Amino acid sequence: MLKISDLRCEYRLNPIGLDVKSPRLSWKLESDRRNCIQASYHVQLSHTPDFAVIIWDSQELTSDQSVHVELEGFQPAARTRYFYRVQVWDTFENSSGWSDAAYFEMGRMELSTDWTGKWITANRSGEPESSCPRMRRFFHIVKPVLRATIYATALGMYELHLNHTRVGEDYFTPGWTTYSKRLQYQTYEVTHQLKTGENVLGAYLGDGWYLGHLGWKIERENYGSTSALLMELHIRYVDGSEEIIGSNEEWSTAPSSIRMSDIYMGETYDARMESDWGDQSQGAWLPAQVLSYPKDIIVAQENVPVMQIEQLQPIALLTTPQGDRILDMGQNMVGWVRFSIEGDAGRAVELHHAEILDHHGNFYIDNLRAAKQRIHYTLKGGGMETYEPHFTFQGFRYVKLIGFPEEVVLDQFTGVVLHSSMERTGHFSCSSPLVNQLHHNILWGQKGNFVDVPTDCPQRDERLGWTGDAQMFIRTSAYLMNTAPFFTKWLRDLRAEQGEDGGVPFFVPDLKSLIPEGWGETSHSSSAWGDAAVICPWVIYEMYGDMRLLKEQYESMQRWIAYIYDQGENVFLWNTGFHFGDWLALDSKPGSYVGATDIHYVATAFYAYSVSLTRKAAAALGKLEDVKVYDELHRNIVKAFQDEYVTPAGRLAVPTQTAHVLALQFDLLETSASKRVAAQLTELLKETQNHLTTGFVGTPYLNPVLSDMGRNDLAYELLLQEDYPSWLYQVTQGATTVWEHWDGMREDGSLWSADMNSFNHYAYGAIGEWLYRYVAGIQPDEKQPGFKKVRIKPYPGPGLEWAKASFESMYGQVKSSWRRQTHGEMELCVQIPANTRAEIHLPHADRRTIKENGSLIHQSADYVFLNKSGTDVAMTVGSGKYRFTYRMITEEGECS
């Protein structure tokens, strides 16, 4: 049986509002036989799901491509829905038949200046500056409606309502972008929300990132001074006519019950001010004001939207030693609390949010700095009322209740988890419950910090898209969830923020007003942070095979390399400027956040790494002349690095764990020196009783380097350490997300300085990549990216009896699990999706004993053996499910 499933357009199921000139299609093959490879495909488009009239036909094309398939010669029309179906044939001449229909709908696609709607803002006379106005417009429908679509954006945030019902499930729209250059609009189908007769459109406006407090300077109006709405409702009638209802002078505005809403500070809501959208009393409603603001910066939604993803119930109601009543959600989460309450009109209640309780058990908010994270609600009275915020989010596990009834009912409180609606793609588990909790913490760190942009932390007065944190975690994030649309949007903002000299801000979107004096010669472009311009698009290419994004970002990659090249007198060393170095490393000097590894050593190492990746990108894009240029540049940087930092005896002049890790990870050493540095790294670990001292820069590469250099035992020992400093130390202290500091909470209960102590900070969660790539062994192949070729190469190590992982690739699900059996045997189970092939490594395998599904492997023609790799036996296989068992041998070649 051959079947097609999971039809996608631009990564999404049935998307609307696309503005790409050539939408790409992807699909997955399902087959009940092994070695299934697509031989050809056939795509058809129609305006109707029954395909009565075919408007575009690829005919049968000989190709095994089933991911990111462009429709040659097809030119989509604006605001038009296209249904598509696919049929494929495999190399066994089986046909799938036609797939079920899927669709995509184009967005406006016209020039942004063609908006007929106008920017409108509220008359806020006498209102507090942070209050949230509302706007409305009445209109009549007298004819049957075929389809109705809203296109909307805002300065600030908006929430639309149509006929008393919220429009869509998206939150914090239009999202955070480089507002001076890029502003997203969203598309909503609202056909079934319209009715014959009078209709009413309504909108709330919030400050959001555009107007509200941002950064540790606690400044408002970083991008503009007023919120505004721009929208159009396009109505297509059954008779073929069309009507556009846009934002203009015909709208009216009034104060709302949202008296204040701010990302950092929280929300103040007075339910006594609530009124129906159709309220005809004219006293409070004033004409909207037209605002002059550019439209040529408006682009379609690129990222997946922020949505309510899941809900948590409190696990306990606590009373602290100080007498506070506290809800314990059981999980450090990001979102808000929905609650129900009954009481007299005018009664006020408050919710305060915090990540932890201090060592006395009291509510701890010092690490929030100036961010209040408070919800203030005033009851309207008259029965049970339910509330949840609109334009704010909190990072918290604990919620302090103020003003609530003496008898608190836990069922009346719900934690609503919000984040960008990325699909979960990765699952991992093993024989260690503590490691499983670590994986849980990494996942929840991603949930909490992928709220439209990849933030450093979700609770204090920061929540910025730090470039370094993003590149350190990007590969882990791509295993856990489908992050391609998320990073596509963020990388376009990075490119937009990139300076004329090629420099890259510390965080994206940028807030130049935040950079304090004393941060060095520049206010941007730290090594390992600015390198996100190169590392992130390359990782997305490897994980998803996204050639278009790589091509789109290639010039940005080149400009970053050119920026570094132009620094200082020696174009092959980066020894100038400000750098964060190995941020928060444990070997730092007292009072310093920067680790002991020389910052210019780090800078030059990343310089070499980014050049090597740009060279690979040039090769992938067929830019052969560029390959030569970057190949020569890379050789010169490596030589300059060796001359500067490697002694004649082959030792590194910088004696830190991170220095040794970077030199090995980035292949900056000759063979003899590499062996010497690897041996020295093990000695440095012995000096700390096999504990790490690495910071943000060294930690992501530490375990991969150890596994690659043949010291997988040390990598496992680091993973499984339970005392400070280690990943599992946080777990033993009750962490449910990853901390910013290895010792954010010390063994004696004391805390790191409140100036910078987040308990939800994903950078050290980069160990997740090692769990998937090394422990479970699921790896992409950069020469056939996006898992067109799968590499299964697990590294079993001491302390785990079994491990398993799955990853939903663009081609289908990849699975790998291993388990130690009795008498020195190993079992490895693998699943390879159709239309791919795999290279499988059986670790420590005695080739003579290898069985697959109970039969000696030499009896089957499904396997092509490769050269023996160390103590591994490697082979290539086609798609299908495999169960290997074999006797393990030691590195010396003896059976274990």
Image (cartoon, helix red, strand yellow):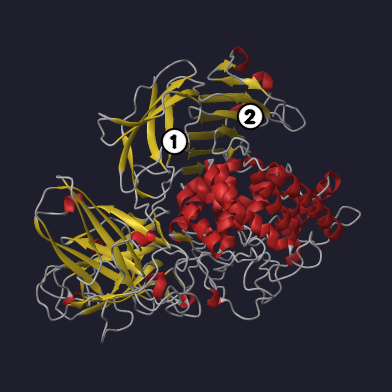
357, 676: nearer the viewer: 676
Q: Hey, what amino acid is under mark 2?
A: Leu
Q: Residue at x 47, y 23 (%)?
A: 40
Q: Residue furthest top?
A: 859
Q: Hey, what amino acid is under mark 1?
A: Gly
874, 71: nearer the viewer: 71
Query: Is the Cβ of the residue at disc 2 closer than 8 Å to that at disc 1?
Result: no
Rendered image quadrant of residue 515: bottom right
Callout 2 environment at 10 Å: few (<14), some (14 to 19), or many (20+)? many
Quarter of the figure with the C terminus: top right
Instruction: First in sequence, mark 2 or 1: give its number.
Output: 1
Dot 1: what SS? loop
Q: Which residue is mark 1?
A: 73
Please tell me how many numbered marks the rendered image carries.
2
Rendered image quadrant of residue 124: bottom left
Q: In the picture shown, does residue 251 fall above or below 675?
A: below
Rendered image quadrant of residue 495: bottom right
Q: In x, y percent, where is residue 162?
A: 19, 60
Callout 1 environment at 10 Å: few (<14), some (14 to 19), or many (20+)? few
Residue 431 seen: no
Q: In the picture shown, does residue 716 fall above or below 467?
A: above
562, 684: nearer the viewer: 562
Q: In x, y percent, where is residue 373?
A: 38, 74
Dot 2: what SS? strand
Q: In x, y percent, where is residue 380?
A: 15, 76
Q: Which residue is mark 2?
A: 842
Quarter of the figure with the N terminus: top left
Residue 663 seen: yes
Q: In x, y percent, where is residue 836?
A: 53, 29
